[in-house]
Amino acid sequence: MRLTADECPRRGAPPVTLRAALARVLSPALLAVALLAVALAGLAVGSNPAQAAAEPGPRWARVVPTAGASAEDPEVARVIVKYRADSPLRRVQSAAAGESAAAPTPRHAARLSLAIRAPLSDGRVLGPHTQSLRGQGLSSSELARRLSSLPDVEWAVVDERRRIHNLPNDALFAENQRTATPAVGQWYLRAPTAEAVSAINAVGAWTSTTGSSSVVVAVLDTGVRPEHPDLQGKLHPGYDFIGLDRGGVATTANDGNGRDSDPTDPGDWTNANECSAGEPASPSSWHGTQVSGLIGAATNNGVGMAGAGWNVMVLPLRVLGRCGGYDSDIIAAMRWAAGLSQNVGVNAVLNVPNPYPARVINMSLGSQGTCTAAYQEVVNELRVAGVTVVAAAGNDTGLKVSVPANCPGALAVSGVRHVGSKVGYSNIGPEVALAAPAGNCVNLQGTCLYPLLTTINLGQRQAGANGYSDGSNYSVGTSFASPLVAATVGLMLSVDPTLTPSKIREILQATVRPFPTSRPLAAGEDPVLACRAPDDRDQLECFCTTTTCGAGMLDAGAAVARTLALRPAPTPDPGTGTGGGGGSSGGGASGLGWLLGLLLATGALHALNRRSRGRAGTRLG
């Protein structure tokens, strides 16, 4: 399945209200009946149709409603397969060049082709017992079914596409903006107010730490525009993991080649019906640049915006292109980001070390479906390695949490409006760990009032001028809630690098602020109901509960403060005796033994001085 970038800003004319649309085609009598039916339907799902029209969601929010064979190529198969550890294939497997025997490279397409009587070719190696495979003349689902029946295979899953789910002195940080929109500036980073209930209080966290450049957050996305002035000096060298498509063309990559060391985003624009039937043409999203800015834009440099992580560094990894990206590329990037693998090759081993392994991986991407065994295995592997995976819950209008955010062990993030209620497009469910601002517009016409301002490129297809999203070209989506959590995790690790993913989750959930249960209603506005468990019906704005939107709303200041309070005391220097070390070797000791030693040494020195004065007087007299 492809995983897609479905949290990009929507550009163009203001949204048309439902009443206006119906009035164009219905008589007054039929219009009244239609509006009554729509109102009753809205009450049935606990949502407000007027609010839905007032707050347009991210582009591509419903492009891929379900995962599965409906979108598969019936003649070209892509799967990810794991072999049993005790399989006979294991005994015939040899270590590939450049890799140790302890980390063998499974490449069994030739043998499996004979077993299932279908032509197969080797794809990416994704672990000691796991690889991707491609086949001809059958669908991905059929190939996964056949492979799963073999005694050597532990599991086989479809290699699916996924899609993207956007007080320093920086000029755009402050509220009351006069020359830029939104007028509220970077409202989501400031302390919460009665108006901006869901703001994360990053300024409170910055009083304790402005982050460490030794902490790396990997952004698995569409790549990045490295020339953006607010990303200068904030990016480590990343990698482009998007491979060539069928026939050796670079349609998905859109950069003229396959995998290489350049994660620059060339644009992910599409033509109408190119990705799926009925999907309109879209401009380039520059999604990875938006996510990177929210995490690590250069801060306190007097230019543009502030990044929530301030000094933390960003590692851009390109896994999504036109129409999204494949699981095998994404999983390979996850392992490389954490330093678990150096292999970036496909048909042959190609070892490229990652000198900047990440402690946090942000995945603002996904699609509907259940967590696959392939994703679950790599999430487990990353947790053991001490790497926290933060993932967007998805933008399918209140449906179930998307893949990979719904994998146990991932830190799934849902989206809330500025007033703290669930934003209409955000997915929800018990898998969500916590919520963060995702951006919302409020108004029916004109400027979007509460988007998440961030770095962007202004080109429609190819790259153009660099700039910032605003009230017209706005960034909204759970894609942009997720990086706020990832940046906060980066600040926590800056304070205490020993934190484990489990401890990070525990601290984040223990320090959240509770969801509101009411808000002021406009004249004639329907009441907002509590969120219900997700099903196959849309669910727009609702009041979050701890079983639908997570433990509560992110409080970065409180999370960092708690991390500081729980940070273990420094280990004493062995050379300083029993005292609690002062942090430097050779002279910072303290404690009772050190004090007694000092008193004895002082007494001996005084006695020596008296004897010396006595001898000197005798000679002079």
Image (spheres, rainbow, N blue to C red):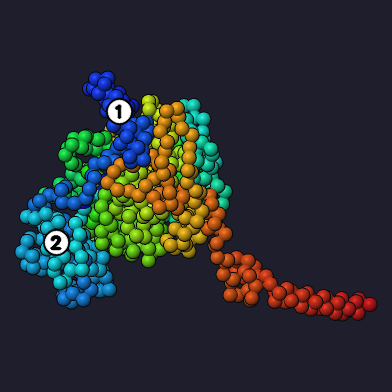
Which is more N-terminal, label 1 or label 2?
A: 1
Query: What is the number of the mark on residue 35?
Result: 1
Q: Quadrant of the C terminus?
A: bottom right
The residue shown at (17%, 58%) is: 79
The residue shown at (47%, 55%) is: 509
- Judging depth in this view, the residue of 176 and 368 nearest the camera is 368
Q: In the rendered view, would you say 46 is above or below 381?
A: above
Tell me where residue 115 sits by quadrant.
bottom left
Query: What is the number of the mark on residue 170?
Result: none
Q: Position of residue 597 (x, y in %)?
A: 72, 77
Q: Position of residue 437 (x, y in %)?
A: 43, 43
The residue shown at (39%, 58%) is: 388
Q: What amino acid is labelled 2 in the image?
A: Arg
Name the side, left or right, on which 64 lies relative to 297: left
The CA span between labels 2 and 1 is 47 Å
Tell me where residue 52 sits by quadrant.
top left
Q: Position of residue 94 (x, y in %)?
A: 19, 73
Q: What amino acid is labelled 1 in the image?
A: Leu
Circle 2 sits in a helix, a strand or a loop, which is it? helix
Circle 1 sits in a helix, a strand or a loop, which is it? helix
The residue shown at (40%, 63%) is: 386
| Residue farthest to the right, as pictured | 621
- Judging depth in this view, the residue of 457 and 604 nearest the camera is 457
Q: Position of residue 223 (x, y in %)?
A: 31, 46
Location of mark 2 (residue): 145
Q: In the rendered view, would you say 583 is above or below 519?
A: below
- The image shows a total of numbered marks equal to 2
Depth-wise, is mark 2 or mark 1 nearer the camera? 1
Q: In the rendered view, would you say 479 is above or below 593?
A: above
Whether label 2 touches label 1, CB < 8 Å: no
Name the side, left or right, on which 590 lies relative to 388: right
Density class for disc 1 (Cα within 10 Å; few <14, some 14-19, many ≥20) is some
